[in-house]
């Protein structure tokens, strides 16, 4: 039987819940989850599964803008997906992703995320498509190419009515830290 999942906006999570989620993320990413990563995961909707030991799985979706073929798309960007080590491979990651995908499908033109090599199989199995085109960002100095992000960006098919064409770049909005 699946554990209960709660969705809530960042503003509806109390400070103790936020500290517990941050601890889960620090542990799940083996200390490679920095303050900028944490900041990127805030300000949107969270999907959180708890058990008797605390947060067992988490993910969030925040609003970003991605330009493709001259049009800026409202993008639900998935951040901070993690499952506690002792409950991995029990379906909690899929449970969190299903909740986040529902939010993306109802509220955004497009879903996007940046996947690690370890995380990519979860996303591709759920229908997320690896972006094969060029990845850029609109920086304070203009559009810059981000070759280090290419291959890791995954998209959830757009509701825009026209498919995204990998012959045309994706241009991400700017933010501190990792752009995609």
Image: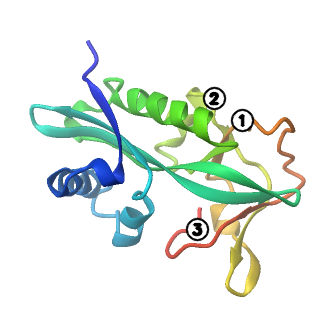
The reply to whether the C-beta atoms of the residues labelled 3 and 1 are less than 8 Å apart is no
Which residue is at 70% across, 43% downward?
109
| Displayed quadrant of residue 22 | bottom left
Residue 7: percent from the left, percent from the top?
Answer: 35, 36
Marks 1 & 2, CB-CB < 8 Å contact: yes
Dot 2 corresponds to which residue?
127
- Taking the image as shown, residue 167 lies to the left or right of residue 107, namely right
Q: Earlier in the sequence, mark 3 or mark 1?
A: 1
Residue 1 shown left or right of residue 53 in the figure: right
Q: Residues within 10 Å of mark 1 (few under 14, many from 20)?
A: some
Among numbered discs 2 and 3, the one appearing first in the sequence? 2
CA gap between label 1 and label 2 equals 8 Å
Q: Position of residue 16 (x, y in %)?
A: 14, 54
Read off the residue under disc 3: 179
Residue 157's disc number? 1
Quadrant for the N terminus, please.
Answer: top left
Tell whether 60 sits left or right of 176.
left
Q: How crowded is the residue under tag 3: few (<14 C-alpha within 10 Å), some, or many (20+)?
A: some
| 15 versus 105 height, above or below | below
154 or 46: nearer the viewer = 46
State the residue at coordinates (59%, 33%).
Answer: 106
Q: Residue at x 87, y 61 (%)?
A: 70
Q: Nearer the viewer, residue 149 or 104?
A: 104
**Residue at the spot x=70%, y=67% of the render?**
147
Horizontal side of residue 146 vs 166, given as left or right: left
How many angstroms separate mark 2 from mark 3 (CA)? Answer: 23 Å
Foreground pick, 11 / 115? 11
Marks 3 and 2: in contact by CB < 8 Å?
no
């Amino acid at each position: 039987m699946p554990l209960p999942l709660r969705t809530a906006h960042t503003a509806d999570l109390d400070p103790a819940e936020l500290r517990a989620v941050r601890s889960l993320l620090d542990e799940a990413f083996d200390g490679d989850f920095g303050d900028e990563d944490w900041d990127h995961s805030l300000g949107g909707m969270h999907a959180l599964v708890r058990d008797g030991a605390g947060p067992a799985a988490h993910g969030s979706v925040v609003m970003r803008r991605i330009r493709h073929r001259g049009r800026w798309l409202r993008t639900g960007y998935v951040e901070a997906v993690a499952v506690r080590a002792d409950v991995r491979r029990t379906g909690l990651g899929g449970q969190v992703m299903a909740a986040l995908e529902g939010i993306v499908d109802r509220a955004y033109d497009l879903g996007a995320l940046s996947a690690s090599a370890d995380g990519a199989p979860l996303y591709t199995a759920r229908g997320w498509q690896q972006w094969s085109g060029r990845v850029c960002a609109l920086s304070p100095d203009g559009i810059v190419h981000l070759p280090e992000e290419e291959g890791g960006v995954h998209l959830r098919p757009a509701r825009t009515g026209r498919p995204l064409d990998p012959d045309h770049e994706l241009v991400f909005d700017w933010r501190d830290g990792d752009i995609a």
